Amino acid sequence: MGVEIHVEGLRKSFGRQVIWEDVSFTIPAGEISALLGPSGTGKSVFLKNLVGLLRPDRGHIYVGGGDVPRLRESDLYEMRRKFGVLFQDGALFGSMNVYDNIAFPLREHTRKGESEIRRIVLEKMEMVGLTGAEEKLPGEISGGMKKRAGLARALVLDPEVILADEPDSGLDPVRTSYLNQLFVDVNAELGATFLIVTHDIGTARVLPDNLGLLFRRSLVMFGPREMVLSSTHPAVSQFFNARRQGPIGMAEEKDLAEMENEGPPVTTMPAPIPPQLMPSDGSVRPAMRRPGEWLRAHRVKPPPGSFIDDQGRNWLTEWDSLTAGRQRPR
Ligand SMILES: Nc1ncnc2c1ncn2[C@@H]1O[C@H](COP(=O)(O)OP(=O)(O)O)[C@@H](O)[C@H]1O
Ligand SMILES: [Mg+2]
């Protein structure tokens, strides 16, 4: 169901300000990927390039055959239907109730009748846990509900790719956990490709199959979660372990004098890799890899204490019994 996104040699600037360059990577089909980076590193600009709202200076974005920056306006319109986008605040229309907000893309982009629309809207509302909130106005519901309504709206056209820009910003930790669980459940059910921009490292450590970091005008690293979470690359390990020491400062980048004051870089052990969030029905998503698989294949020792869950179970040794008979077919 999901499609792969292949980005090659992408560069974007505004006037003389280069936002990022030489960005090349592949977002795997049907997997959950997360893109992180300090504020102002161009994460939102990247998402806008993917859907053709902004045009890169150079480079390619291949999505299901087409190269987004080179599509004609009419083809771009078609291409955008492959995407469901969840903006930061849900971006709901304030004067429309939740039902009409979610129905909006169907009324705008399809010729479906109202009874068909009703079936789809109610199905997506149930999926995100909003049943019963049809008549509410955006001003009358909580931040978490707005995000879920935004997600339901992003889902109604059955997108192959779901993009979310800081869906967890402004949510408390408990609501963030619920939203992350919802992403995992929706991915398990629909198999769409997810790209989630976040700067919540709690989210980054448990949710995605792949992680990327934008820093100093480039994509420093992108790859499977075990690769990134076990990395000792200075910026990567500083960011994903939320440490003060390292190349990332209060301002977007520390200046060199400040870094010299810190003395030589210390190699610190990455924090334990937590078990990955599972769908709430206990099934295993096709994109989910066996814990420790990447580490073993690359002869990297897991950081001590990795893969132990809050019930004390060790996912490295107990994976087979934890997941017996629960693989979802691809
Ligand atoms: N339309 C635009 N015109 C000019 N500069 C922009 C535009 N959009 C974003 N920028 C600049 O690009 C940089 C990256 O912005 P953004 O993608 O919003 O960062 P992030 O989402 O990582 O916090 C910022 O310096 C911002 O001011
Ligand atoms: Mg942003």
Image (tube, grey):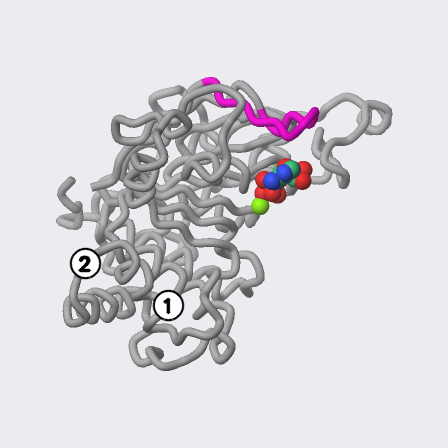
Q: Residue at x 39, y 26 (%)?
A: 61
**Amino acid at circle 1:** Asn
Magenta stretch encompasses residue 100: no
Q: Position of residue 37 (x, y in %)?
A: 59, 38
Q: Position of residue 270 (x, y in %)?
A: 56, 34
Q: Main secondary structure of the magenta part?
A: strand
The disc placed on residue 101 is 1
The disc placed on residue 28 is none
Of badges 1 and 2, nearer the viewer stands 2
Quarter of the picture holding the N terminus: top left
Q: Position of residue 59 (x, y in %)?
A: 46, 20
Q: Residue at x 39, y 66 (%)?
A: 149
Total marks in image: 2
Seen in the image, is 21 located left or right of residue 4? right
Residue 17 position (above or below residue 327)? above
Q: Position of residue 5 (x, y in %)?
A: 34, 30
Seen in the image, is 200 located left or right of residue 79? right
**Amino acid at circle 2:** Arg
Q: Which residue is mark 2?
A: 111
Q: Secondary structure at mark 2?
A: loop
Start-end of magenta stretch: 9-20
Q: Secondary structure at mark 1?
A: helix
For ligand 1, give the image quadrant.
Answer: top right
